[in-house]
Amino acid sequence: DGGITQSPKYLFRKEGQNVTLSCEQNLNHDAMYWYRQDPGQGLRLIYYSQIVNDFQKGDIAEGYSVSREKKESFPLTVTSAQKNPTAFYLCASSPGPHYGYTFGSGTRLTVV
Amino acid sequence: AQKITQTQPGMFVQEKEAVTLDCTYDTSDPSYGLFWYKQPSSGEMIFLIYQGSYDQQNATEGRYSLNFQKARKSANLVISASQLGDSAMYFCAMSSNFGNEKLTFGTGTRLTIIP
């Protein structure tokens, strides 16, 4: 079945470490997105990519980086510059306007 | 800039009753899309229903319908005959028809169905 796979489901990061969240899709969607979810704040856009080898900053890109070397993959790196990284991270993909998103099951990142 | 407002942080509804979740939006784009998603406690986001700004009729998907009032800039979700499995967070979102498909989300409404 087609879908989006996010891994790991739970991730623990020490202060000062970079960590990478994986997002893979087999839906043949061109566009992919990363959102952050904090309690009471809904979803906020971190980065998005509409085509391979191109990506754009979202509303809260500081402290994050992405790459889009393959259509199927859109990994997110949470760098040590992100001061408050503890959150639930959701990856999504879309085939185009008005189709909405297909979401992965999320990664819960905790700083220890 | 686009903005979505959901003013009901939480709602409690008796099983089998209908429920309306409010959503208002603000945009200067002439063409846009409106979406509702359900997020159970497991965390995944489930697409429920879509309404285009130029659609003449309100969207319906099974027990879900979208009460779209363009002049009032509202896109309320109506769930008929609520079930215990409807207990979840519900998010309203909108997209612009111009440039890209990124969605702007509201802060959500937590719906609890009471047996």
Image (cartoon, rainbow, N blue to C red):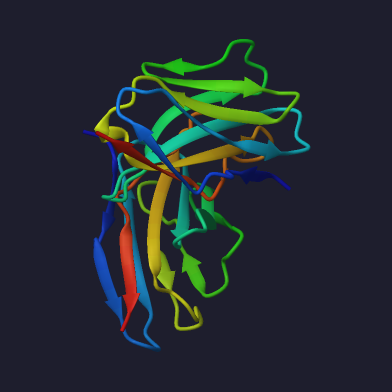
Q: Residue furthest top?
A: B57
Vertical position of residue A40 compared to residue B44: above or below: below
Query: A29 left or right of B101?
Result: left
Query: B31 left or right of A45?
Result: right
Query: A5 left or right of B62?
Result: left
Vertical position of residue A109 compared to residue A40: above or below: below
B91 or B47: nearer the viewer: B91
Q: In which image quadrant can residue B14 be found?
A: top left
Name the residue: 44% across, 61% down.
Answer: A39
Q: Position of residue A107 (x, y in %)?
A: 31, 61
| Tally of numbered tags | 0
Name the residue: 50% across, 53% down.
Answer: A42
Residue A96 visible in the displayed image = no
Q: Position of residue B106 (x, y in %)?
A: 56, 46
The C terminus of chain A - image quarter:
bottom left
Q: Position of residue B107 (x, y in %)?
A: 53, 50
Q: Residue furthest bottom?
A: A16
Name the residue: 41% across, 70% down.
Answer: A77
Q: Position of residue B32 (x, y in %)?
A: 66, 30
Vertical position of residue B70 compared to residue A53: above or below: above
Query: A35 left or right of A3?
Result: right
Name the residue: 73% across, 27% down.
Answer: B72
The N terminus of chain A - image quarter:
top left
A9 or B57: nearer the viewer: B57
Q: In which image quadrant can residue B4 be found?
A: top right
Residue A27 visible in the displayed image = yes
Q: In which image quadrant can residue B13 be found?
A: top left
